[in-house]
Image: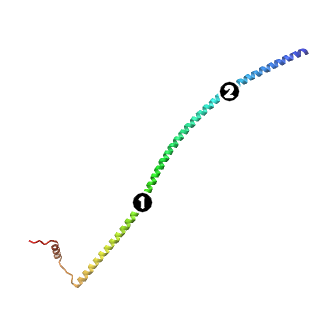
Amino acid sequence: MPSNLKTEEPNTQLEDLKCQVDHLINLVAEMGSVATQAEAMTAREAEQIGEDFIAEMALLEARLREKEGILVSREALLETLKSEMAALIEEMTQLRRDKDRMSSESERLRSELKQRKLLLAKAEADEWRSIGRRNSWKRWLGALGKLPTKPAEEQEAGNLTRRLPLTSS
């Protein structure tokens, strides 16, 4: 039996090696299949990632356009507000000038009014003085008895004759 063992051993070894080779071939085939699946999966994942990336880029571009639109409208609004502000500043400057002019005009008119009041007061004072002098003259002349005393009717008649021109007939 020992001789039989020797021949059997190489056959068994050969069989074992064949089994191992078959097993390795199956593993390689399986690995090839897994690699193909992995490549297919990687291609699908890459395609999905690409689609996701394109969708995200489209979304970001839409947001960018929206933000640019808002920015443009706000810049236009800002320019409008700047021009309105410049117009208001100009109007305020004009109002200040008008106020200064009116203030100086008011001061001038007050000064003129004050001068006229002074002149009027002087005229009234002179008038009162002359009335006072007349009254004092009347009293003085009345006291002397030299004040002409004509009746009122004669004075009226004398006034009429002075006013009417003399006509010759």
- Badge 1 amino acid: Lys
Q: Residue placed at 83% from the left, 18% from the top?
A: 14
The x, y position of residue 101, in whole percent, is: 41, 61
**Residue 21 image point, x, y percent:** 79, 20
Image position, residue 108 (x, y; %): 38, 65
Density class for disc 2 (Cα within 10 Å; few <14, some 14-19, many ≥20) is few
Residue 104, visible in the rendered structure: yes
The residue singled out by tag 2 in the image is: 39
Cα distance, mark 1 to mark 2? 86 Å
Q: Residue furthest left?
A: 169
Name the residue located 82 percent from the left edge and 17 percent from the top edge: 15
Residue at the disc numbered 1 = 99
Instruction: Name the kind of residue labelled 2 in the image.
Output: Glu
Q: Is residue 86 above or below residue 145?
A: above
Going 51% across and 45% down the picture, which residue do you hit? 75
Instruction: Answer with the quarter of the image where residue 35 lies.
Output: top right
- On the question of residue 1 being in view, the answer is no
- Residue 86 marker: none
Image quadrant assignment for residue 163? bottom left
Res 167 → quadrant = bottom left
Q: Which quadrant is home to the C terminus?
A: bottom left
Nearer the observer, 110 or 132: 110
Secondary structure beneath disc 1? Answer: helix
